[in-house]
């Protein structure tokens, strides 16, 4: 038995002597794997406690138990810091404050507190001698973080205590209020009401100061573009008083597709009639009409072809005596789709607003070239187009011409022209009457041949027969 025991002992020892290094490395690797797994499980447990829907009191109790479950301060700190990142996204102020005692108080913690939005926590961090403009490497300033996350109360607190948007602020220079206003409007993180409230408070700092630098003017112009985009008439009005220029080409960082667009065009593009009215009232006062005539011309064209006529109506009401040419009238015909009601076409709106306008032959040729074939008889667009034909003819001074008859592409338009001729041909020369009658006969044959074709072969039929509305 002793020999067997001795043999067994030697047999057990032999492998240790021959392969001891391999066994030792394997044991160490297993220990490391177990340690990594334990760390991961601990971190997952804390994250689960922070994000679970257990109620604030239960979450707090679970978190306290987990924090005390490890004696390794580094492991606890790492887990708590990761938990704070999650809690800050959820904006859970209570848990964030409880986790604060287990992590270093530095720029990283301040940034997370600003993302969480707790003014109380930010105050506590600042009392620990952390700079109000402290940033972790490559990150934004605390004020920029608060702006991006839409924490208006925290933004007010930081601004009042000297926070800046620049990573390296100008020493001895106060932060530009106009830069702050621009950042608020371009952040996209606030509702219009919150935006107006915050901008109102920021602009109070400027009541006793003058706009003296080019940088101030640039920020005011950018703010005006951003205010036009969100549709805030209050902010637009305030900025216009600060010598903002509706004709400026300010770059709007939040909307790259709208870059280099003047505020007037941004308001039209975003369908903001209230803002458009304000800008036009300011633009058309004094000598600005002549200075900004090209912009007003572009603005009128931009109002054409929209689904609703309200932008064009607002523009005409407040644009003063802007020059309206045949080009505008023709474009109004070409861009107006079939979705408008009776009397709501762009051309009808313009002619009713400007009784002095007389449609030229070119305008009427374009107008009578509108195809009605394929549009249901009950459609408002069909009734509206008939009325518009008659209205435009009465307003014109060229009467019915051969070009207009040749442009007609359906029977209804031809009937309107023929009826007008019958009512007004008493003073015409016989030669002119003969020419007009021959044109009517030719047009009637052409239209009859067109109507005899299958629907899909007719002129103006197909998916692209009407222009697309904006």
Image (cartoon, grey):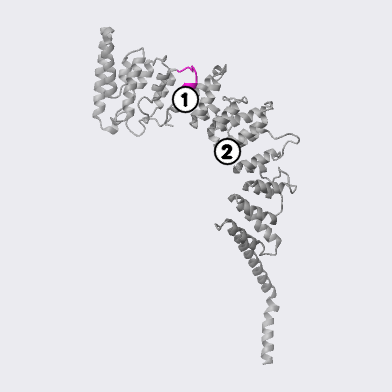
User: The residue tagged with tag 1: helix, strand or loop?
Assistant: helix
Earlier in the chain: of badge 1 and badge 2, it is 2
Q: Residue at x 60, y 60 (%)?
A: 44
Residue at the bottom extreme? 1
Q: Is residue 318 magenta?
A: yes
Left or right of 246 in this view: 466: left
Residue 191 is situated, as x and y percent measured from the top left of the image, at 55, 39
Residue 33 is situated, as x and y percent measured from the top left of the image, at 63, 66
Which label was assigned to residue 194? Answer: 2
In terms of depth relative to the viewer, which is nearer, 259 or 146? Answer: 146
Residue 253 seen by the camera: no
In terms of depth relative to the viewer, which is nearer, 293 or 64? Answer: 64
Q: How far apart in space, not on screen, are marks 1 and 2 (Cα)? A: 27 Å
Res. 66 image quadrant: bottom right
Residue 440 is situated, as x and y percent measured from the top left of the image, at 26, 17
Q: Is residue 237 magenta?
A: no
Q: Is residue 270 above or below residue 125?
A: above
Residue 321 is situated, as x and y percent measured from the top left of the image, at 49, 16
Given this view, does label 1 or label 2 mark the residue nearer the observer?
Answer: 2
Q: Residue at x 62, y 62 (%)?
A: 40
Left or right of 4 in this view: 48: left
Residue corresponding to mark 1: 314
User: The residue tagged with tag 2: helix, strand or loop?
Assistant: helix
Q: Which residues are magenta?
A: 313-324
Contact (CB < 8 A) between labels 1 and 2? no
Q: Is residue 425 above or below residue 105?
A: above
């Amino acid at each position: 038995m002793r020999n067997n025991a001795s043999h067994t002992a030697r047999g057990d020892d032999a492998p240790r002597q021959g392969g001891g290094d391999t066994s030792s490395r394997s044991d160490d690797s297993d220990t490391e794997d177990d340690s990594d797994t334990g760390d991961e499980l601990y971190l997952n447990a804390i994250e689960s406690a922070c994000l679970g829907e257990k109620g604030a009191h239960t979450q707090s109790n679970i978190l306290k138990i987990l924090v005390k479950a490890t004696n390794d301060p580094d492991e606890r700190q790492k887990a708590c810091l990761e938990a704070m990142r999650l809690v800050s996204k959820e904006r859970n102020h209570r848990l964030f404050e409880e986790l604060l005692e287990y992590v270093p108080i530095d720029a990283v913690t301040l940034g997370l507190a600003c993302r969480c939005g707790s003014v109380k926590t930010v105050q506590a961090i600042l009392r620990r001698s952390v700079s109000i403009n402290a940033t972790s490497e490559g990150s934004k300033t605390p004020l920029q973080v608060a702006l991006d996350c839409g924490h208006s109360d925290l933004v007010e607190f930081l601004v009042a205590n000297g926070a800046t948007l620049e990573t390296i602020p100008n020493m001895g220079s106060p932060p530009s209020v106009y830069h702050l206003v621009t950042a608020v409007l371009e952040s996209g993180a606030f509702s219009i009401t919150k935006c107006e409230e915050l901008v109102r408070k920021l602009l109070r700092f400027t009541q006793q100061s003058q706009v003296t630098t080019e940088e101030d003017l640039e920020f005011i112009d950018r703010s005006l573009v951003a205010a036009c985009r969100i549709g805030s008439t209050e902010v637009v009005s305030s900025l216009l008083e600060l010598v903002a220029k509706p004709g400026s080409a300010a770059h709007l960082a939040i909307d790259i597709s709208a870059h280099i667009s003047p505020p007037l065009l941004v308001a039209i593009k975003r369908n903001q009639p209230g803002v458009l009215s304000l800008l036009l009232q300011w633009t058309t006062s004094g000598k600005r009409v002549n200075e900004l005539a090209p912009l007003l011309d572009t603005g009128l064209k931009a109002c054409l072809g929209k689904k609703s006529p309200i932008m064009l109506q607002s523009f005409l009401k407040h644009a003063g005596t802007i020059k309206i040419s045949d080009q505008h009238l023709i474009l109004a015909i070409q861009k107006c789709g079939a979705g408008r009601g009776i009397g709501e076409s762009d051309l009808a709106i313009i002619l009713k607003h400007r009784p002095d306008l007389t449609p030229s032959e070119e305008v009427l040729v374009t107008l009578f070239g509108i195809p009605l074939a394929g549009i249901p008889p009950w459609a408002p667009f069909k009734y509206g187009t008939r009325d518009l034909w008659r209205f435009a003819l009465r307003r014109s001074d060229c009467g019915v011409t051969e070009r207009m008859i040749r442009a007609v592409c359906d029977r209804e338009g031809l009937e309107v022209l023929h009826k007008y001729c019958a009512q007004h041909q008493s003073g015409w020369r016989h030669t002119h009457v003969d020419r007009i009658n021959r044109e009517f006969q030719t047009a009637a044959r052409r239209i009859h041949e067109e109507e005899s074709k299958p629907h899909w072969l007719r002129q103006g039929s197909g998916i692209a027969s009407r222009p697309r509305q904006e």
